[in-house]
């Protein structure tokens, strides 16, 4: 019995806490909104562990208690025991669920939802919550638009979200196809991307760092591979990043990169992708103006290096099946090397 109880306790502790050290953990918070969610999650986790331990003890008592004969037991129609059923099956769960409900309602005050009593309507929120960033979900990647009253200071990137520390950032989320859900656990809760329904989230990051995010609503075969990385930077570092992103694509200087640019703008690449400062102006795929500065490829799945970039160009379907990027096997080895050289220098 001691061994059984020890194993039960170990499982009760390990299972709910096994995700605490993962990059996308609700317990690893770096913002006030995420902290509020984490506190409620800790309460529910502790409640689950305590309940599991109590149930394990009760089951162990029932299993190992002394067994007698039928003559020693109460008659089958004997009354009694209803009080324990009422306490354990009704009263205690009612108290626990009521407390969680009240705490949850209080926490929801930190996350206003349009249409709720006392909250702005969807139209009022659209008018009043002016977005700093617009995020559009695609199957299966994130389009990120940094908006500004001055059109010359508006630019678009993909899959990597840059934020200044200690400053609230208003984000509007939309979808270009099916329903998605934007979620960076370390910074805030989830918000759904619904076709025809703009939604909003305000992110306030209290620490610098790199935090991973994920689409949290099933959106097709590659749903698990629709990831995002948030880079929270000091204001100076963020301003420097914005200044670099506002520049057009770097002009190639090496012979192979110059040849790669010619291939890019004269082939199917330019029909889908944009590189600002060149004739390539496609809008159906990620903006590649500064792809060389990004850390990852394919919505944060593969490292952004020569090998994976070459593989992605020639055989994307083997890396991310059913994505909109087609296989392009007709390029020669020299052409692929030139394309990679051009894209890598787009810093």
Image (cartoon, rainbow, N blue to C red):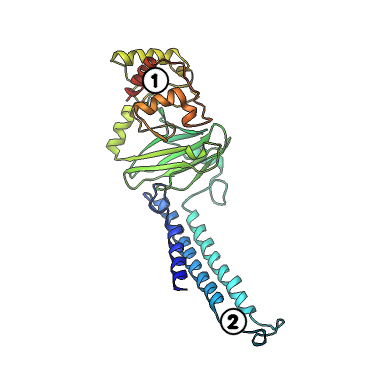
Q: Which residue is mark 1?
A: 276
User: x, y (%) of residue 134?
Assistant: 46, 34
- Residue 312 vertical position relative to residue 92 in the rendered view, above or below: above
Residue neighbourhood size for the residue with mark 2, other residues' Cα within 10 Å, grouped as few (<14), some (14–19), many (≥20): few
Between the residue at mark 1 and the residue at mark 2, the CA separation in whole angstroms equals 81 Å
Element under label 1? loop
Residue reaching furthest to the front: 69
Residue neighbourhood size for the residue with mark 1, other residues' Cα within 10 Å, grouped as few (<14), some (14–19), many (≥20): some
Are dots 1 and 2 in contact, CB under 8 Å? no
User: x, y (%) of residue 245?
Assistant: 34, 27
Query: Is residue 294 visible to the viewer in this orientation of the structure?
Result: yes
Q: How many marks?
A: 2
Q: Which residue is drawn at the image coordinates 47% and 66% (left, top)?
A: 8
User: x, y (%) of residue 209?
Assistant: 32, 43
- Residue 340 vertical position relative to residue 214 in the rendered view, above or below: above
Query: Would you say 235 lies left or right of 151 here?
Result: left
The C terminus - image quarter: top left
Q: Which residue is mark 2?
A: 67
Q: Earlier in the sequence, mark 1 or mark 2?
A: 2
Query: Is residue 249 visible to the viewer in this orientation of the structure?
Result: no
Q: Which residue is drawn at the image coordinates 43% and 64% (left, top)?
A: 10
Tell us which disc is closer to us: 1 or 2: 2
Pick the residue in front: 61 or 50: 61
Q: Please identify the quarter of the rendering in which residue 233 is found.
A: top left
Element under label 2? loop
- Residue 107 vertical position relative to residue 251 in the rendered view, above or below: below
Residue reaching furthest to the bottom: 72
User: x, y (%) of residue 279?
Assistant: 42, 14
Pick the residue in front: 340 or 287: 340
Q: Which residue is drawn at the image coordinates 51% and 29% (left, top)?
A: 323
Residue reaching furthest to the right: 77
Q: Which mark is residue 267?
A: none
């Amino acid at each position: 019995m001691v061994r059984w109880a020890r194993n039960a306790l170990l499982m009760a502790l390990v299972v709910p806490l096994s995700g605490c050290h993962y990059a996308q953990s609700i317990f690893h918070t770096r913002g006030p909104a995420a902290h509020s969610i984490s506190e409620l999650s800790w309460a529910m986790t502790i409640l689950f562990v305590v309940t599991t331990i109590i149930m394990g003890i009760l089951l162990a008592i029932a299993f190992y208690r002394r067994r007698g004969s039928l003559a020693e037991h109460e008659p089958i129609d004997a009354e009694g025991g209803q009080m324990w059923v009422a306490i354990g099956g009704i009263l205690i769960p009612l108290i626990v669920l009521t407390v969680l409900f009240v705490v949850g309602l209080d926490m929801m005050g930190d996350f206003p939802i349009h249409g709720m009593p006392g909250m702005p309507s969807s139209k009022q929120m659209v008018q009043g919550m002016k977005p700093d960033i617009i995020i559009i979900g695609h199957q299966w990647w994130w389009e990120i638009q940094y908006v500004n009253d001055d059109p010359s200071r508006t630019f678009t990137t993909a899959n990597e979200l840059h934020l200044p520390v200690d400053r609230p950032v208003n984000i509007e989320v939309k979808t270009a196809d099916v329903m998605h859900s934007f979620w960076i656990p370390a910074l805030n809760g989830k918000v759904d991307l619904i076709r025809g329904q703009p939604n909003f989230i305000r992110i306030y990051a209290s620490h610098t760092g790199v935090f991973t995010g994920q689409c949290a609503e099933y959106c097709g075969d590659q749903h698990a591979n629709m990831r995002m990385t948030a880079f929270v930077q000091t204001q100076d570092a963020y301003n420097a990043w914005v200044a670099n992103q506002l520049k057009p694509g770097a002009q190639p200087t090496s012979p192979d990169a110059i040849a790669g640019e010619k291939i890019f703008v004269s082939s199917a690449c330019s029909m889908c992708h944009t590189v600002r400062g060149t004739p390539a102006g496609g809008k159906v795929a990620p903006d590649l103006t500064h792809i060389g500065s990004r850390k990852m490829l394919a919505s944060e799945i593969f490292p952004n290096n020569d090998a994976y970039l070459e593989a992605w160009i020639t055989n994307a379907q083997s890396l991310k099946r059913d994505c909109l990027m087609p296989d392009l096997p007709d390029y020669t080895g020299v052409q692929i090397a030139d394309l990679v050289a051009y894209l890598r220098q787009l810093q």
